[in-house]
Image (cartoon, grey):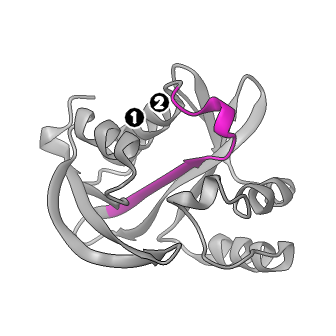
Amino acid sequence: MIRGERVLLRAAERDDLPRFVQWLNDPIVLEYFGNLFPLSLEQEEKGYEAMLQDSSLCSFAVEFKGRRVGGAGLSSMDSRNRNAEVGLFIGVPELWDQGLGRDVTTMLLRYGFEELNLHRIYLRVFAANERAVYLYETLGFRHEGCWRRGESRHGRYHDIPWMSILRAEWSG
């Protein structure tokens, strides 16, 4: 378990899966995150089984005040170059804009840099997700580039900026 100021990251367990499916099928949560198609419990279970076998993936459930509220993790971990991609979501929209995402991201950076000895942590984000872009910028992530109109959602193409932070830049 990893304790932050407000949230707890713990290993994702099989009993978290129904809640993940609920969140990842919610159109509000999916606005800037997740699949384009409905996700079944069976699909999430298969993904969970694959995750257990994948050493390049570290997945967490996010808890706030003893309640499951989201998911987070590091993926595409590259031990040779010491890189990983960070991702997270808060699946309870009523809890957005309360600093939980900042706490989760800070904990993932600390874990990645201090425990996993990573050199670089990167992410992709929808440019229109201004809250997330602002959060990442304030934590020290720098823009590396952008997939112009790189993903289609709701009949519109969206720019997908790539951002990263190096261990030497991190102020943790």
> Looking at the picture, does residue 124 appear above or below residue 139?
below
Disc 2, SS: helix
**For residue 169, what is the image quadrant?**
top left
Residue 43's spot in the image, x, y percent? 77, 79
Q: Residue furthest front?
A: 155
Disc 1, SS: helix
Q: Which residues are magenta?
A: 84-97
Relative side of 159 to 92, left or right: left
Relative side of 124 to 71, left or right: left
Residue ID for mark 2: 103
Residue ID for mark 1: 106
CA distance for labels 1 and 2: 5 Å
Relative side of 140 to 60, left or right: left
Residue 68's spot in the image, x, y percent? 75, 39
Relative side of 113 to 55, left or right: left
Residue 154's spot in the image, x, y percent? 53, 72
Q: Nearer the viewer, residue 137 or 8?
A: 137
Q: Residue at x 67, y 79 (%)?
A: 37
Residue 119's spot in the image, x, y percent? 21, 54
Q: Residue at x 24, y 75 (%)?
A: 147
CA neighbours of label 2 inside 10 A, class few (<14), some (14 to 19), many (20+):
some
Instruction: Indicate the amino acid at tag 1.
Output: Thr
Instruction: Indicate the amino acid at tag 2.
Output: Asp
Q: Residue at x 87, y 55 (%)?
A: 15
Quick check: is 92 in the magenta stretch?
Answer: yes
Marks 1,2: beta carbons within 8 A? yes
The quarter of the image holding the C terminus is top left
Is residue 67 in view?
yes
Query: Looking at the image, how many numbered discs can be counted on the residues?
Result: 2
Q: Residue at x 22, y 69 (%)?
A: 81
